Image: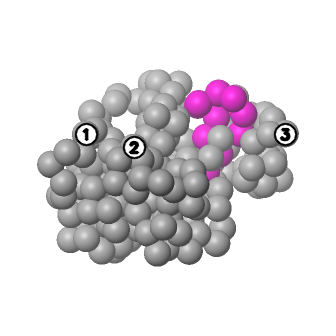
């Protein structure tokens, strides 16, 4: 499989539904072909210091941003029926499920793959398996870590480098 969409969410607080930004990178035939980034007004709309400390986003960034359903209306046609790839799919899939449930949007049965799991299998011996470490091991320089689009680009680069989506042993 050489076609997929890498996705990354940042959240405002401990609630998975509190997505405050999304980055998506579309990969076709093994090459990054399209991307999308948007700020999102989170729900619930409050920021915890530890989230702000990670990604730097706050009310000043998202109070005038669109709510998730309006943003997702732009993302859904972009990703169409592509499988989704995330670095730590448990977090990003959980965010997507949480915010879709909150806004009562039907789950379109997305198939998720995980570059974190794949890198643990295929790149044994790394100091850690954080996104920036794995990206560097795959030859990708992640300059703006915790920006949703930059993280989605790094995830796409890792998936391409590992060819994880072409391997028979990659599990959703």
Q: CA distance from mark 1 to mark 2?
A: 9 Å
Which one is earlier in the sequence, the residue at label 1 or at label 2? 2
- State which region is magenta: 12-21
Q: In which quadrant of the rendered image does the N terminus lie? A: bottom left
Q: Position of residue 102 (x, y in %)?
A: 53, 25
Task: Report crowding for label 1: few under 14, some 14 to 19, many 20 or more residues within 10 A (C-alpha).
Answer: few
Q: Is residue 5 left or right of residue 144?
A: left
Instruction: Tell which of 110 and 87 is nearer to you.
Output: 87
Q: Position of residue 19 (x, y in %)?
A: 61, 40
| Snapshot colouring | one colour
Q: Position of residue 153 (x, y in %)?
A: 48, 66
Q: Position of residue 123 (x, y in %)?
A: 40, 56
Q: Is residue 160 above or below residue 69?
A: below
Q: In which quadrant of the rendered image does the C terminus lie? A: top left
The disc placed on residue 171 is 1
Residue drawn at x 78%, y 54% is 56
Labels 1 & 2 near each other (Cβ < 8 A): yes
Q: Nearer the viewer, mark 1 or mark 3?
A: 1
Residue drawn at x 64%, y 72% is 143
Labels 1 & 3 near each other (Cβ < 8 A): no
Q: Can residue 13 be seen by looking at this rendering?
A: yes
Task: Report crowding for label 2: few under 14, some 14 to 19, many 20 or more residues within 10 A (C-alpha).
Answer: some
Q: Is residue 85 left or right of residue 39?
A: left
Which one is earlier in the sequence, the residue at label 2 or at label 3? 3
Q: Is residue 123 left or right of residue 22?
A: left
Residue drawn at x 55%, y 41% is 68
Q: Nearer the viewer, mark 2 or mark 3?
A: 2
* Residue denoted by label 2: 117
* Residue denoted by label 3: 49
């Amino acid at each position: 499989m050489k076609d997929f969409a890498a996705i990354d969410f940042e959240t405002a607080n401990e609630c998975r539904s509190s997505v405050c930004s999304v980055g998506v990178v579309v990969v076709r035939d093994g090459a990054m072909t399209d991307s999308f980034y948007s700020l999102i007004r989170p729900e619930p709309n409050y920021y915890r210091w530890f989230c702000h400390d990670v990604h730097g986003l706050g009310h000043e960034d998202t109070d005038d941003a669109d709510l998730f359903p309006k943003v997702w209306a732009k993302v859904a046609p972009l990703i169409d029926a592509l499988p989704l790839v995330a670095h730590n799919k448990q977090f990003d899939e959980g965010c997507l499920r949480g915010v879709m449930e909150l806004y009562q949007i039907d789950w379109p049965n997305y198939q998720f793959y995980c570059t974190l799991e794949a890198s643990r299998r295929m790149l044994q011996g790394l100091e850690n398996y954080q996104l920036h470490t794995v990206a560097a091991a795959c030859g990708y320089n992640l300059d703006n870590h915790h920006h949703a689009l930059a993280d989605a680009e790094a995830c796409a680069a890792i998936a391409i480098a590992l060819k994880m989506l072409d391997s028979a042993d990659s599990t959703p």
